Amino acid sequence: MAMPKATSIVLAVVLVLAMVSLVAGTTGFATFYTPCYIPSACYGNQDKGSMIAAASEVFWNGGKACGDRFVVKCKGAPNDGVPHPCTGKSVTVQIVDLCPSACQGTIDLSQEAFAIIANRDAGKIKVEYHQI
């Protein structure tokens, strides 16, 4: 009789850990780019608005990231420039472009999206992000 109870406990723990890892997300860095946002690598001259981002090679995957949506939240400053850049908010963006080879971030947000989560004077921030 103890086996089924132990199995249930183990299953519950695994489920909780899986949920926590989905919520926690992946860490990286975000930078921002300025308008004009078209043309883009994913959509050419289609205007996809301003809640957009360019993916770095970390998750570009040969263009398969096009259209993917990510929730991004600022987690702090990577240097001493702006010590407390975060607003405490998160932003949802759609991948529409590829960040250039000299990209300094994991994800390159539009300046409007960046401004929702951080002080633009920071230029580069630590972020946590997850795909939705």
Image (cartoon, helix red, strand yellow):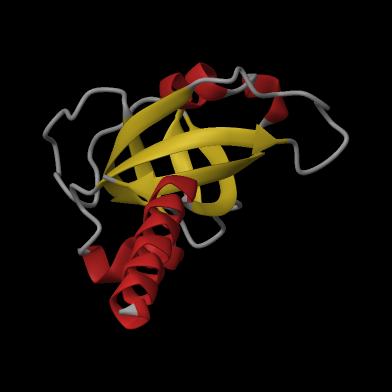
Q: Residue at x 40, y 55 (%)?
A: 16
Q: Nearer the viewer, residue 22 or 3?
A: 3
Q: Nearer the viewer, residue 80 or 35?
A: 80
Q: Where is residue 50 in the image (x, y as percent from the top left)?
A: 30, 23
Q: Nearer the viewer, residue 50 or 100?
A: 50
Quadrant of the frame with the N terminus? bottom left
Q: Which residue is drawn at 34% across and 60% down?
A: 15
Q: Nearer the viewer, residue 105 or 21?
A: 21
Q: Which residue is drawn at 75% across and 36% down?
A: 77
Quadrant of the frame with the C terminus? top left
In this rendering, position of residue 119 left or right of residue 63:
right
Q: Where is residue 25 in the image (x, y as percent from the top left)?
A: 46, 51
Residue 63: image quadrant is: bottom left
Q: Which residue is drawn at 65% across and 23% down?
A: 86
Q: State whether residue 59 is above or below residue 79.
A: below
Q: Position of residue 88 (x, y in %)?
A: 58, 20
**Number of marks:** 0
Residue located farthest toward the right when viewing the structure as drawn: 80
Q: Position of residue 57 (x, y in %)?
A: 43, 66
